[in-house]
Image (spheres, rainbow, N blue to C red):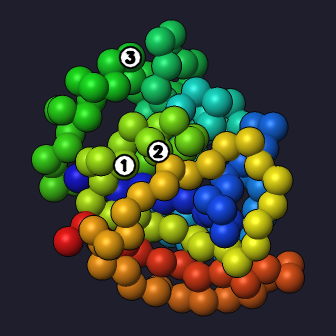
Amino acid sequence: MFSIIAAIGKKNELGKNGQLVFHIKEDMKFFRETTNGHKVVMGRKTWESLPGKLPKRENYVVSRKKVEGADKTINDLNQFIKANKDTEEEIFIIGGGAIYAAFLPYAKNLYLTEINKSVDADVFFPIFDKSKYDKTIIKKGNENDLSYSFAKYTIK
């Protein structure tokens, strides 16, 4: 099964100039704890924005060309989705915007850090119909003058 994990602003902001627009320590910890031991799927630009391979996870990168350092390069996104959408294994989709949009119709869970602020961005999380999901607030917090909630949306 596919699960999406992201930190988004009030207007679904994700990133700008190849970087995240929000930097919340508690969100990074939540991301690490939630994705540890799982496969993580990301686009090439997200891979390039990282300081290196994410430890304790299998790093899959969507790209037409082989990606050095990745555990696997996904050349055919549709084939990968078809082969993995019904597996019991939880596979995390970690960005960027186009990758989120491609996987959203197949995702069973959305783990969203919803940040109560709007900022300038050039990459956004796709709009989705919240009425198709059950929402659970995992935890609320404040950091760096930002209030946020860790929310889990599960498809009904």
The residue sitting at 81% across, 61% down in the picture is: 119
- Relative vertical location of residue 80 with respect to residue 54 in this rendering, above or below: above
The amino acid type of the residue labelled 1 equals Leu
Residue type at tag 3: Asn
Q: How dense is the environment of label 2, judged by Cα within 10 Å: few (below 14), some, or many (20 and up)?
A: many
For mark 3, give the secondary structure: loop
- Horizontal and vertical percent position of residue 81: 25, 34
Query: Whole-Å distance between the Cαs marked 1 and 3?
Result: 19 Å
User: For residue 23, what is the image quadrant?
Assistant: bottom right
Vertical arrangement, residue 80 with respect to residue 118, above or below: above
Looking at marks 1 and 3 on the same chain, the residue that comes earlier in the sequence is marked by 3
Q: Name the residue carrying label 1.
A: 104
Q: Residue at x 62, y 48 (%)?
A: 124
> Residue 75 at what x, y percent from top left?
38, 17
Whether the residues at callouts 2 and 1 have beta carbons within 8 Å, the answer is yes
Which residue does the numbered mark 3 point to in the structure image?
75
